[in-house]
Image: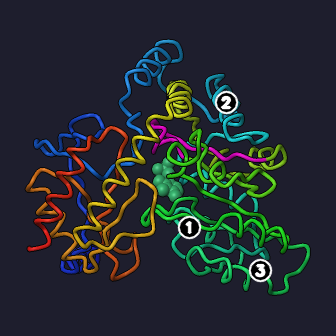
Amino acid sequence: MGFESLASELELRKQKHLYRRRRLLQSPQGTGVQLDNKHYLAFCNNDYLGLANHPDVVKAFQQATNECGVGGGASHLVNGHHQQHHQLEKELAEFTGRDRVLLFSNGYMANIGAVNALLGKGDLVLEDRLNHASLLDAGLLSGARFQRYQHANNDSLSQFLAKPRPEKNRTLVVTDGVFSMDGDIPPLPELAKSCAEHNAWLMVDDAHGFGTLGKNGGGCVEHFGLGQDDVQVLVGTLGKAFGTAGAFVAGSELLIETLIQNARTYIYTTSMPPAVAAATRVSLKLLQTESWRRERLAELISRFRVGAAQLGYELMDSSSPIQPIIIGSEEKALNLAGWLEEQGVLITAIRPPTVPKGTARLRITLCAEHTEQQVDRLLDLLDQAKSK
Ligand SMILES: *Cc1c(COP(=O)(O)O)cnc(C)c1O
């Protein structure tokens, strides 16, 4: 069989302005990057605190590599569970105020592993309709009955929870902590209350909240003051505000032991390089103690929002560093991103299926290391773009 059907599918994708291309990053990640031999001011990565290339984090990584080598070499359950992993798990448990933490290689695997270790056929998983792809995939893969509820809507969730279910079957409610493409936060205290009333567990993936939300960067659960009895399964990723790589699940002793026994994406994979864990221990310290990075971020977010609103742009209900501008059509979003790029500013156009049809957008993200002048430059370009 030839590949003609693939060729026509790809061609169709191009015509619909949905084709995705990769470009070459030739510098460290940051607010200023070199991409395909050109320098850009970037407003599109998730390195919200500017830790991905922080000298202390880089140094910790280098030192640990000298001491531990590069590869993890085996899975955690064989002999790949390095003391650097173990130490990081303990420090993250203390940071999140949970009994224990389990490290995963990345957020996608953490979500697939956690949901599938907890649920199977006969169970029920309820997901916010705008959840991250990895959460939706996790629910679908589990074989549990899969139901989406209206975005960030506790009434919609409660309606599904109120339907009678067999007592022996489990129910898991799953939501982003900060929505990755919209930047808003669900009403977690209400969701937690509904789950408690209806004997369901709540799982929150706070990939974008850790480091950016909460006084100490503890994310949405710190922001709302929710403990492990309110949010039983808490997921964080390390590739965003932490600036490194990997992910973790935090919760009770019983949850973590269950994951060690049952989570296939934990069991059947090589442990992350120990030096990544060592570097993350340093970035965790910076993230907790250098609260000026969060304050700075808040100032820049506010500056951007005030400026963009004055220009007549409609903003989303977001106080996070994710500040999308909805454009609508894929073609228009691509054209605007292309024009900004010609002016030296990099912002990716996010298109379906990452976001719902008709809501293609510029996903602007701010970083603690942006300057006021850089935010003003972006606003100035957005002003000029209005007449295009
Ligand atoms: C980025 C992201 C993930 C995936 O995490 P990785 O470590 O990059 O695999 C999971 N959930 C959410 C909400 C995310 O934004």
Mark 1 and mark 3 in contact? Answer it, CB < 8 Å: no
- Badge 3 crowding class, 10 Å Cα cut-off, few under 14, some 14 to 19, many 20 or more, is many
Which residue: 46% across, 41% down?
Answer: 294
The magenta region covers 237-251
Which residue: 55% across, 31% down?
Answer: 284
User: Which residue bears the numbered disc 3?
Assistant: 161
The type of residue carrying mark 1 is Asp
User: Which residue bears the numbered disc 2?
Assistant: 91
Q: Is residue 120 left or right of residue 299?
A: right
Q: Earlier in the sequence, mark 1 or mark 3?
A: 1
* Alpha carbon separation for disc pair 3 and 2: 35 Å
Q: From this view, report whether residue 366 is shown above or below residue 90.
A: below
Where does the C terminus fall, quadrant-wise?
A: bottom left
User: Which residue bears the numbered disc 1?
Assistant: 137
Q: Earlier in the sequence, mark 1 or mark 2?
A: 2
- Badge 1 crowding class, 10 Å Cα cut-off, few under 14, some 14 to 19, many 20 or more, is some
Q: From this view, report whether residue 108 is shown above or below residue 61.
A: below
Q: Is residue 91 magenta?
A: no
Q: Position of residue 304 (x, y in %)?
A: 30, 56
* Alpha carbon separation for disc pair 1 and 3: 21 Å
Q: Is residue 75 left or right of residue 238?
A: right
Q: Which image quadrant for residue 145? A: bottom right
Q: Earlier in the sequence, mark 3 or mark 2?
A: 2
Mark 1 against mark 3, which lies toward the viewer?
A: 3
Q: Which image quadrant for residue 296? A: top left
* Alpha carbon separation for disc pair 1 and 2: 29 Å
Q: Is residue 366 left or right of residue 294?
A: left
